[in-house]
Image (cartoon, rainbow, N blue to C red):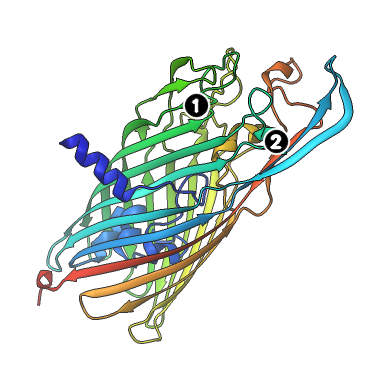
């Protein structure tokens, strides 16, 4: 029954997300997304507070439940160029180039959160179930794009599907009327499916495809929140590395032979700092995050193993800047604008290894609003548009080309690149239990 409940919750609240910053969702829920994900020091809603700073839930003095559902569209495109070789293995001077568009379709994005607070209590509690991370592509086999040619000449059909559901239980304590601390233990459940699976050893027919593998992980988040009472706010939080069990893949090769392999893939530590300001007309929020991919299993290592499998993604640390403004001059209809900037974690030399995880968005723009129907019910919506900016580029890699001066096996005069845009519309509903208020 526990396994059934976990899988049911996973299917409901975690999705095939094409993420905004590395493989990390920039925000959770319509309100937090519409502020660009900024909420470390500006808790406008419980979802953003629970996601980025558990200490900030101390601002909520009621029992509140929040549900959000979004429809996410993405359009990754994969380009490749390779030189042509003659029968003796020498370049002819001609090149073969092409591109392939992703045909994945629409992904749903749900989020569920709840907070319990009382005006006369220093303690506030919260619970959440968020899809906080993911990537996925579907590039069909193609004879016009060298990277998508059938194996062993290319990779053929390329498909990936990574999903991470995080369940958190939060506690915040008010040390004073201005300063709060918070802690949030987290339980994580993830799945990963790869076709082909580059973490497995190839055989004579090429790389295998995998069935969907699962892994579980644990971690925590700690937060500090300061509210001056005169409009200025500050916050900081640290989400620890989420340590996972290994994915255990059941691989099937093109010649119908089978094999197993394991792959470790953790979720990186995230350090967040935030500033906020509030007056009668405006709420302002600014967040900075540092994501530590360079010390995270699955992302820190890269390159070919001695058996021609891929050791890992090889990502660098990234910085994320989120900013948002809420205008409250229209009665019962607060309006919001948000922006998110993210650096690219993928170095040029390992772009080839990251074809299954091309979801890198450099600039994201959000427009949203809420309708406060009454004291209990509030409805939210947001529209998001994101772009990767410059394409991620590198060379095509092949272990047959490895040498002392070319340790990754870069094929001379080859090129691999990918970029994408994203769009999303999301709706949310919040219910506040009035009987939890204190007169």
Question: Residue at 42% of width from left, 57% of height from top?
Answer: 27
Q: Nearer the viewer, residue 137 or 59?
A: 137
Name the residue: 60% across, 46% down.
344
Side of 261 relative to 358 (left or right) = left
Q: Give me the residue at 33% from left, 78% from top.
A: 371
Give left or right: position of 397 versus 75: right
The residue beneath circle 1 is 209
Mark 1 to mark 2 CA distance (whole Å): 20 Å
**Above/below status of 160 relative to 12:** above
Kindly identify the residue that appears in the image at 58 percent across and 43 percent down: 358
- Rendered location of residue 186, percent (x, y): 28, 42
Q: Is residue 179 visible?
A: no
The answer, for residue 180, to whether it is visible in the render is: yes
Of the two numbered discs 1 and 2 in the rendering, the one whose residue sits closer to the viewer = 2
Q: Residue 360: horizontal and vertical position, in percent?
A: 57, 48
| Quadrant of residue 376 within the rendered picture | bottom left
Which one is nearer the viewer's eye here, 260 or 310? Answer: 260
Q: Position of residue 81 (x, y in %)?
A: 76, 36
Count of labels in the image: 2
**What residue is shown with label 2?**
143
């Amino acid at each position: 029954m526990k396994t059934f409940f976990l899988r049911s919750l996973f299917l409901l609240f975690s999705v095939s997300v094409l993420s905004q910053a590395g493989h990390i969702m920039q925000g959770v829920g319509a309100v937090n997304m519409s502020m660009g994900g900024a909420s470390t020091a500006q808790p406008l809603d419980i979802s953003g507070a629970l996601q980025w700073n558990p200490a900030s839930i101390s601002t909520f003095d009621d029992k509140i439940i929040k549900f959000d559902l979004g429809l996410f569209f993405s359009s990754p495109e994969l380009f490749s160029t390779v030189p042509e070789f003659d029968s003796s293995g020498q370049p002819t001077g001609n090149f073969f180039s092409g591109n392939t568009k992703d045909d994945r379709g629409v992904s749903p994005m749900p989020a569920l959160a709840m907070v319990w607070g009382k005006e006369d209590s220093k303690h506030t509690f919260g619970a959440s179930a968020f899809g906080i991370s993911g990537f996925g592509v579907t590039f069909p086999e193609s004879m016009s794009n060298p990277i998508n040619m059938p194996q062993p000449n290319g990779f053929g059909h390329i498909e990936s599907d990574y999903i991470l559901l995080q369940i958190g239980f939060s506690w915040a304590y008010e040390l004073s009327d201005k300063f709060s601390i918070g802690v949030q233990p987290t339980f994580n459940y993830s799945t990963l499916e790869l076709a082909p699976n580059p973490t497995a050893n190839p055989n004579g027919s090429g790389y295998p495809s995998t069935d969907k593998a699962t892994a579980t992980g644990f971690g925590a988040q700690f937060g500090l929140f300061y509210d001056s009472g005169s409009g200025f706010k500050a916050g900081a939080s640290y989400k620890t590395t989420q340590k996972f069990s290994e994915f255990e893949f059941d691989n099937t090769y093109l010649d119908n032979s089978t094999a197993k392999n394991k792959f470790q893939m953790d979720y990186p530590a995230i350090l967040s700092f935030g500033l906020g300001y509030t007056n009668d007309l405006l709420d302002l929020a600014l967040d900075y995050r540092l994501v530590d991919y360079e010390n995270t299993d699955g992302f820190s290592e890269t390159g070919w193993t001695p058996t021609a499998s891929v050791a890992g993604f090889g990502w660098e640390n990234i910085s994320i800047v989120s900013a948002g403004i809420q205008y409250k001059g229209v009665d019962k209809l607060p309006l919001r604008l948000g922006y998110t900037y993210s650096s690219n974690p993928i170095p040029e030399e390992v772009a080839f290894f990251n074809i299954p995880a091309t979801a890198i968005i450099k600039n994201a723009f959000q427009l949203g609003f809420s309708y406060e129907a009454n004291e209990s019910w509030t409805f939210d919506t947001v529209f998001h548009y994101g772009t990767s900016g410059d394409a991620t580029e590198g060379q095509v890699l092949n272990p047959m080309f490895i040498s002392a001066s070319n340790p990754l096996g870069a094929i001379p005069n080859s090129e691999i690149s990918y970029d994408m845009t994203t769009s999303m519309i999301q709706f949310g509903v919040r219910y506040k239990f009035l009987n939890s208020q204190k007169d």
